[in-house]
Amino acid sequence: MRVSVPIRLDGLVYRVGGRTILDCLDATIGGAGITAVIGPNGAGKSVTLRLIDGLLAPSAGTIRIGADGSARRAFVFQRPALVRASLARNIGLALDPLGLGRAARAARIEAALARVGLQGRAGDPATKLSGGEQQRLALARAWATQPQLLLLDEPTASLDPAATETIEALVSEMARGGTKVVLVSHNLGQVARLADDVLVLAAGRAVEHGPTRQVLFSPRTAEARAYLKGELPWTSFAAAS
């Protein structure tokens, strides 16, 4: 089990082009399990992930990750960011900063591909994979670095139900293995299946945060209720699952 990686966001502000995307966002995300971040379009969900990962710098406020302020992170986007090379090379590039020896590196790549059901395909071109296979490769690359924190931005938005089920199973497995997962998703059925807790954003602020069932089925705030009411079709699916 890896070390717990709590995330503290204090007064987080992000402005671009004269527009305020995040407006004094305060949140404490626990260091274990899967946290889902939900909310309407434009609420600042994806920006929050990118700020946590360091891809963007906040206009104001602070971000603290883990006890010492840092953690090994991996980011999986809605559309996998793959290079035009083999599956092995795509994973190997992520391993470069770790300074592994040749044998350890090869073993890590082989294990990562096996983990996502792509064993025996190390030499295949990544660009020839299906959408679901590309996302599995992106997860393999993330897993290979043994991250303490995995950030996922709509990882199944463009996938069919079978591929979505596979990705969800892999994400759950990583969380059970000790990786903290923060997931942005508009798929509330997916949130109900995967998340331990849910953070609701609206207009660049955190308006509700709590256990998944409480937030989804008994939201306390008007903003959360309004968002969930607008997504009503998912509730019958969630109740049946």
Image: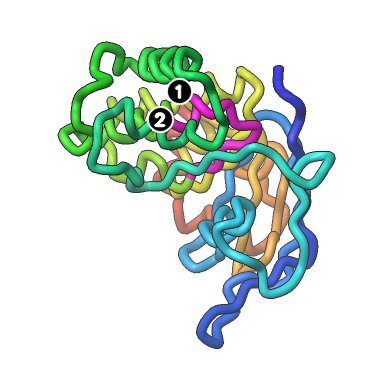
- Inspect the image, locate mark 2, and give the three-letter code of the amino acid beneath it: Gly
- Name the image quarter holding residue 39: bottom right
Q: Which residues are magenta?
A: 141-152
Q: Is residue 125 above or below residue 36?
A: above
Nearer to me, 240 or 69: 69
Residue at screen point 66% across, 22% down: 178
Horizontal and vertical percent position of residue 131: 24, 37
Within the magenta stretch, is there residue 142?
A: yes
Q: Residue furthest right?
A: 67
Considering every residue shown, the one lying at the far front of the view is 101
Q: Is residue 59 visible?
A: yes
Q: Residues within 10 Å of mark 2 (few under 14, many from 20)?
A: some
Q: Is residue 36 above or below residue 20?
A: above
What is the spatial separation of the Cα atoms under label 2 and label 1, in whole angstroms? 20 Å
Which mark is drawn over residue 170? Answer: 1
Q: Residues within 10 Å of mark 1 (few under 14, many from 20)?
A: some
Q: Is residue 162 above or below residue 237?
A: above
Disc 1 secondary structure class:
helix
